[in-house]
């Protein structure tokens, strides 16, 4: 990250800026940094001015206690100012929930696109999310960062043997380093259900995306988001899953942002 802006509470937020055209800020999801969305930034940069940033507590950005979702919205306000005073937002997974909350807060957000925000679509999903919140809170309070990461990976559906393999990999220490931010994403997700009252106050166009090869509940969640906002569109990307390919996603986002 070669640039930095200062959020309202004094926290430095690191970002990279590339390309030309309408400004869009890329909001990564849990266990991710700005580097995670860098390939998408590259794919968009010939049509958009793209800001990819490290959310607070990750990468080159700072962190200031105590955490509140409002602080992350203030981070986006600072980035929007750096982008020229207005920008679109693209958020992936729980980063999409943050992008929607920022738009609902009244920031100068032109458009919002989100990809597979994991909102619960039934009571069983909501109970699983509540159980995860309790276990995650306990693990982080006890300093068991590795267990916190494992809880998150289990929530995503990763098989136990693959999780154990990940524990033995070189990347595990990096995952443990940002494990406390799992609590941030959990707070951004609220109770895990689609926040219909909040979404009803989003005043800009919203594009809710999902992968055609993803689980059905992911597509249902995206459809629910599109239906809950005043100006929403749902679209499924054929053959894509939660790890959407930038080459497939970028043209869809560019078309939406140009509109």
Image (cartoon, helix red, strand yellow):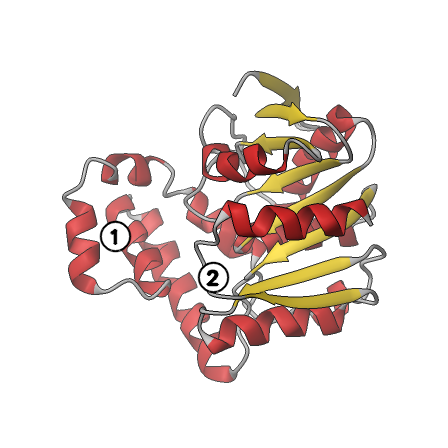
Q: Quadrant of residue 77?
A: top right
The answer to whether residue 238 is above or below residue 34 is below
Q: Quadrant of residue 258?
A: top right
Q: Is residue 11 visible?
A: no
Residue at 74% x, 24% y: name it: 82
Q: Is residue 185 left or right of residue 98?
A: left
**Residue 16 location in percent, x, y?**
58, 24
Considering depth in this image, is 159 or 78 the residue closer to the camera? 159
**Residue 173 location in percent, x, y?**
25, 35
Q: Is residue 120 left or right of residue 18?
A: left
Residue at 67% x, 44% y: name it: 70
The answer to whether residue 208 is above or below residue 8 is below
Q: Is residue 158 left or right of residue 118?
A: left
Task: Single out the mark in the foreground, 2 or 1.
Answer: 2
Q: Mark 2: give few (<14), some (14-19) or many (20+) Cα within 10 Å.
A: some
Question: Disc 2 vs disc 1: Cβ atoms closer than 8 Å?
Answer: no
**Residue 202 location in percent, x, y?**
80, 58
Q: Quadrant of residue 66?
A: top right
Considering depth in this image, is 237 or 177 the residue closer to the camera? 237
Q: Is residue 35 visible?
A: yes
Q: Which residue is the site of mark 2? A: 240
Considering depth in this image, is 163 or 90 the residue closer to the camera? 90
Considering depth in this image, is 21 or 94 the residue closer to the camera? 21
**Residue 153 location in percent, x, y?**
32, 57
Q: Which residue is the site of mark 1? A: 147
Please tell me which of labels 2 and 1 falls first in the chain.
Answer: 1
Return the residue found at the far top.
2
């Amino acid at each position: 990250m070669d640039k930095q802006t200062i959020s309202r509470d004094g926290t430095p937020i690191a970002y990279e800026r590339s390309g030309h055209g309408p400004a869009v800020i890329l909001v990564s999801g849990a266990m991710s940094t700005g580097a995670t969305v860098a390939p998408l930034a590259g794919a968009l940069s010939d049509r958009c001015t793209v800001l990819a940033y490290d959310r607070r507590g990750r990468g080159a950005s700072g962190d200031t206690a105590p955490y509140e979702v409002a602080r992350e919205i203030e981070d986006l306000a600072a980035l929007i100012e750096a982008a020229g005073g207005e920008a679109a937002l693209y958020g992936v997974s729980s980063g999409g929930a943050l992008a929607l909350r920022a738009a609902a807060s009244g920031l100068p957000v032109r458009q919002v696109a989100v990809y597979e925000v994991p909102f619960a679509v039934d009571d069983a999903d909501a109970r699983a999310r509540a159980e995860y919140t309790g276990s995650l809170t306990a693990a982080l309070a006890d300093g068991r960062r590795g267990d916190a990461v494992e809880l998150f990976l289990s929530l995503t559906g990763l098989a136990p043997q693959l999780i154990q393999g990940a524990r033995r990999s070189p990347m595990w220490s990096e995952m443990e380093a940002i494990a406390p931010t799992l609590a941030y994403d959990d707070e951004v997700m609220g109770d895990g259900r689609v926040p219909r009252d909040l979404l009803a106050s989003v005043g800009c166009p919203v594009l809710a995306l999902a992968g055609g090869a993803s689980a059905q509940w992911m597509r249902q969640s995206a459809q629910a988001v599109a239906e809950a906002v005043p100006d929403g569109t749902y679209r499924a990307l054929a053959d894509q899953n939660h790890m959407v390919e930038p080459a497939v996603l970028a043209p869809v986002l560019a078309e939406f942002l140009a509109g």
